[in-house]
Image (cartoon, helix red, strand yellow):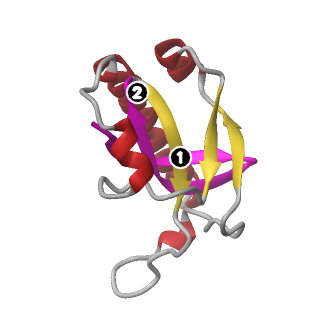
Amino acid sequence: MIVDVGMPWIHENSRYNCRVFIQHGKILLIRPKLYLAMDGNYREGRWFARWMKRGKVEETVLPKIIRVATGEDKAPFGDGPSLHPSAPRAKLRRQHASGISMLARAIICVMLSLASWVVGARTQRWK
C-alpha cells in the first residue's frame, strides 16, 4: 500500500505545499505542487512557492525526526513519476505496508511544527 500525505515542506529555503508518498516506512517521493490555487478563497501563493523545475527530481535532506523513523538521510523531491495505483511501476510496489505507524507519527510531528512555524510567521507579519 502506498500512503499519500499532504504537508508543507521546506526545500532550498522555499516552502512548498507537497504530497509525500510513503511505502513500507520509506519515503518514495516528496512532490510539490506545480500550480497553486489563487482564486476565490484560496491564496496559496502567499505561503507557498510553486515547483518550477517541471520533470526534475532532486534530493532533499530529511528532518531529524524523520531520519530516525526511516533510517534515511535524504529523499527524492520534485516532479517525479506517477505513483497512481494503476501505474505500471506502482503495481510492482503493491504489498502490505509495514513500519508506517512510526513514520506517520514522525510526519505528523513535522506537520505540527511547520504549522506552528507558519502561524508564528503569520502573527509576526501582523505586528
Is residue 3 part of the magenta span, yes or no? yes
Prevailing secondary structure class for the magenta stretch in the rendered image = strand
| 41 or 27, nearer to the observer | 27
| Amino acid type, residue under disc 1 in the picture | Ile
Mark on residue 109?
Answer: 2
* Residue at point 35%, 57% (across, down): 84
Q: Which residue is mark 1?
A: 30
Q: Residue drawn at (57%, 18%), measured in percent from left and top?
A: 67
> Which stretch did the figure color magenta?
1-24
Is residue 6 visible from the viewing direction of this image? no
Q: In the rendered image, which quarter is residue 126 located in?
A: bottom right
- Dot 2 lies on which element? helix
Horizontal and vertical percent position of residue 75: 61, 35
| Secondary structure type for disc 1 | strand
Q: Is residue 9 above or below residue 107?
A: below
Q: Nearer the viewer, residue 3 or 38?
A: 3
- Amino acid under label 2? Cys
| Image coords of residue 116 (percent x, y) | 45, 39
Q: CA distance from mark 2 to mark 1?
A: 17 Å
**Residue 61 visible in the current orientation:** yes
Is 92 placed above or below 33 here? Answer: above
Instruction: Name the residue rendered at 32%, 23% in the picture.
Output: 100
Residue lying at the far right of the rendered structure: 12
Nearest the viewer among 104 and 90 is: 90
